[in-house]
Image (cartoon, rainbow, N blue to C red):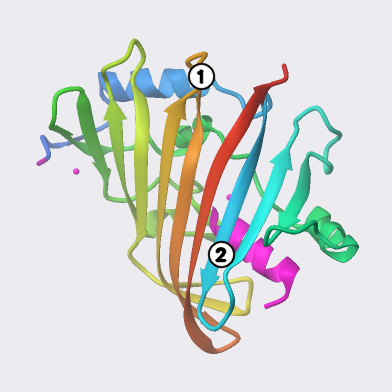
Amino acid sequence: MKFAKCLAVCLAVMTSGATGVAHADVLQNQVLAAARATRSDLYAFRRTLVVERTGAARQVFEEAFDPRRPAGQQWSLLSVDGRAPTAKEAEQSRKVKRGPVPFYGEIVKWFGAPATRNDGAPGYVTYRFAQLPPGALKIGSHDASADTQAEALVNTRGKVPIVEQVRLVSTKGFRMMLVASVQNISIGGRYHLLADGYPVPAESSSNLAGSLLGKAGTMRATVTYGAFQKVR
């Protein structure tokens, strides 16, 4: 798979004892209020994307995001497999459609949906969602929300509750980008607080099984975030 197509596919993928089903409870509303207060343009950061797929060598891309730069220039490719990118790779990277900037507020799209709740270990609450609201999970042009189950682990030990971990699992196959057929996909994410108490992404991952141009295979992508710097 060419550099630009590989990066685009990965970034497109990368855009639980219950007490009963109900709409958002008090804790969910607290989490949602905190998430709505976050923004995607307050911090510059770096992320490292590691891609492992059938029949290909492991690839590592390092990127930087700076919200102070003009629209369309906020992402920059820093390295490919530990080396400086070629001029062609840098140009291809600038043309890749990355979708929304990753930030904690993304959970607002689905965390208020009907869920089952489990108050487990002290200081933690788990919510399970049988499906996501329309538009909550779009992979390429495909809306996988109705066929995706979710689980969220909430840490309630601090002053403000925070979703520390999420896991999304598809329950139905679909096609994407005309050349790929997805049999199943699982997506995981982890958030943490910066020293100033602001919630940001720490890590995300996706595992995909399907076919590309008729050839079956799997792909795993892992993203780690770091070097957060407040700029606004």
Counting residues from the start of the chain, the first of labels 1 and 2 encountered is 2
Q: Which residue is mark 1?
A: 198
Most foreground residue, 48 or 131: 48
The tag on residue 121 is none
Region in magenta:
1-17
The residue sitting at 75% across, 30% down in the picture is 67
The residue sitting at 51% across, 48% down in the picture is 135
Determine the residue located farthest toward the bottom in the rendered image.
214
* Element at label 2: strand
Place of residue 32 in the rendered image (x, y in percent of width and height, measured from the top left): 41, 24
As drawn, is 149 to the left or to the right of 34? Answer: left
Q: Which residue is mark 2?
A: 51
Q: Is residue 14 magenta?
A: yes
- Quadrant position of residue 80: bottom right
Q: Is residue 12 visible?
A: no
As drawn, is 28 to the left or to the right of 92? Answer: left
Q: Is residue 228 magenta?
A: no
